[in-house]
Amino acid sequence: MTHQQPTTNRAFQEMRKPALDRLADRVPEELSARTGIPFDRQRQVFSLSSLGRNMEIDYPGYEIRPAVDDWHHLLILHYLDLADGTPLSHQLMAFGDLPSGMVRGGGFDRQSEQDLGLRLGHAPQAQVERACRALGGVLTPSNADVCAVFSLFPNYPITLKLWFADEEIPGSGRLFLDRSASHYLTVEDAVTAGSVLMETLVQELNAHC
């Protein structure tokens, strides 16, 4: 596994540089209005809460404190760059329903449904709910055994619906986006966002097993 890490870091660095270039000279107040991320003009920092973690983003360097996972970091930069301020629709859609998302998003829908069932569908419900709350997830009533809405970014919620396994039916789960999602991240970013949420949730669950 260790020999793959430099490749991952290099890929992140290669994608981070153009993201920073696109953000150069952007007006922070306009970014704040488009993203919903508050900006403190006196301190020259954005204040972001993402998946239950509070962080600050320096302006104009866009350094993030405390440090986050590489792909979470890249998503923050892309969100700052791409957000256009479109209001939430409060209507759910699958990743495959994103514009041009049938292949990449649809593949993620199928894979994540299986992975969520295998990795979370056999866990005690109380532990899953506790892990969701630890990541800032808001538990809401639904047709699922557990439904939680996570704030990846202010205008980019991701909804988890999870059904637990029993003697007859295997566990399963689905992740959903708001229908405004394409105004904030690309299809590729959306898939990365779903993966980051899923991995972080599994890590949080395993940490308290």
Image: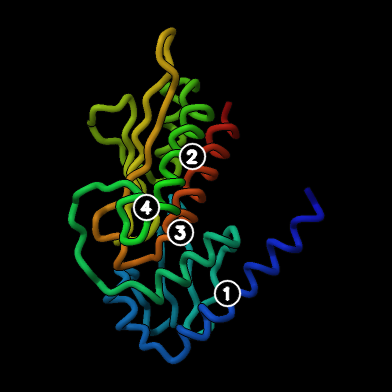
Disc 3 marks which residue?
54
Label 4 CA crowd tier, 10 Å (few <14, some 14–19, many 20+): some
What's the amino acid at mark 2?
Gln
Where is residue 144? Give x, y as percent.
29, 27
Instruction: Find the distance from the CA under tag 4 to the CA under tag 3.
Output: 33 Å
The mark nearer the N terminus, 1 or 3, is 1
What's the amino acid at mark 1?
Arg
Instruction: Find the distance from the CA under tag 1 to the CA under tag 3.
Output: 21 Å
> Mark 3 and mark 4 in contact (Cβ < 8 Å)?
no
Write the residue at 52% across / 86% down. 21
Label 2 CA crowd tier, 10 Å (few <14, some 14–19, many 20+): few
Q: Nearer the viewer, residue 185 or 209?
A: 185
Disc 1 marks which residue?
16
> Mark 3 and mark 2 in contact (Cβ < 8 Å)?
no
Q: Nearer the viewer, residue 118 or 80?
A: 118
The mark nearer the N terminus, 4 or 3, is 3
The mark nearer the N terminus, 2 or 4, is 4
Image quadrant holding the C terminus, namely top right
Where is residue 135? Give x, y as percent.
44, 45
Residue 109, relative to residue 89: is it above or below? Answer: above
The mark nearer the N terminus, 1 or 4, is 1
Q: Quadrant of residue 9?
A: bottom right
> Mark 1 and mark 2 in contact (Cβ < 8 Å)?
no
Residue 128 appears left or right of 144: right
Where is residue 94? Give x, y as percent.
32, 46
Considering the numbered disc 1 on the image, is that residue within a helix, a strand or a loop? helix
What's the amino acid at mark 4?
Met
Disc 2 marks which residue?
111
Considering the numbered disc 2 on the image, is that residue within a helix, a strand or a loop? helix
Residue 64 appears left or right of 125: right
Disc 4 marks which residue?
102
Write the residue at 25% across / 72% down. 85
